[in-house]
Image (cartoon, grey):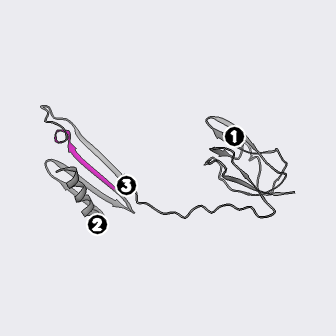
Amino acid sequence: MKAKEIQDLIDFIAKSGLDEVNIETESFKLNVKRSSSLVTKTVETTSQQLFAPVATPIAPVVQTVATQPVVSTPAAEPVAASSNTVIVRSPMIGTFYRSSNPETPAFVEVGAEVKKGQVVCIIEAMKLFNEIESEVSGRIVKVLVENATPVEYDQPLFIVEPN
């Protein structure tokens, strides 16, 4: 069976609505399983069928392809500073940390007063830990990023209500 025929068969089975199909012949074995919108296709055949004939038997070649459907997600809501707040943004790409190590408390919490130049978090980039300082003095209104998560350049990190 040729790759195109196998693909046509898989597409036909996918359209049929079946959750699982197993087809086995002397030359190939085909398993198609569908679980909660994730389709896994496994095709098993001997390498003798893929390449020129060989005198000694060779172990089967297994090819697995997993495809996930395209899921449209709503765009992230932009964070807008109200007229009386300032957004502290990430100056770089990296991993956001609220404290210098897991045993110490966070640099700032919601409701904490910060001064201009005070360290509010750390962003690790290429094994370098960069202290991020507040751009204004004021009170932390909201922390916008979870600890130990990746951040992008110019991503909002904190909302600060200036004094």
Graded by Cα atoms within 10 Å as few (under 14), some (14 to 19) or many (20 or more), the crowding at tag 3 reads few
Residue at x-position 30% and y-position 64%: 19
Q: Count every numbered label the image shows and give the total.
A: 3
Residue 161 image point, x, y percent: 81, 59
Above or below, comparing residue 134 to residue 59 in the picture: below
Disc 1 or disc 3, which is closer to the eye?
3
The amino acid marked with disc number 1 is: Asn
The Cα atoms of the two marked residues, 1 and 3, are separated by 38 Å
Which mark, residue 62? none
Which mark, residue 101? 1
User: Considering depth in this image, is 103 or 18 the residue closer to the camera?
Assistant: 18
Confirm or deny contact between disc 2 and disc 3 (CB under 8 A). Answer: no
Residue at x-position 84% and y-position 47%: 116
The amino acid marked with disc number 3 is: Thr
Residue 6 image point, x, y percent: 22, 54
Q: Please, what secondary structure does the residue beneath circle 1 have?
A: loop
Q: Looking at the rendering, in which quadrant would you find the C terminus?
A: bottom right
Residue 133 image point, x, y percent: 77, 44
Disc 2 or disc 1, which is closer to the eye?
2
Q: Does the magenta-highlighted stretch encompass residue 98?
A: no
Label 2 sits on residue? 15
The Cα atoms of the two marked residues, 2 and 1, are separated by 52 Å
Label 3 sits on residue? 67
Marked residue nearer the N-terminal end (1 or 3): 3
Q: Please, what secondary structure does the residue beneath circle 3 have?
A: strand
User: Considering depth in this image, is 133 or 34 the residue closer to the camera?
Assistant: 133
The amino acid marked with disc number 2 is: Lys
Left of 72 or right of it: where is 162? right
Instruction: Specify the principal SS of the magenta part.
Output: strand
| Residue stretch rendered in magenta on the structure | 40-49
Marked residue nearer the N-terminal end (2 or 3): 2
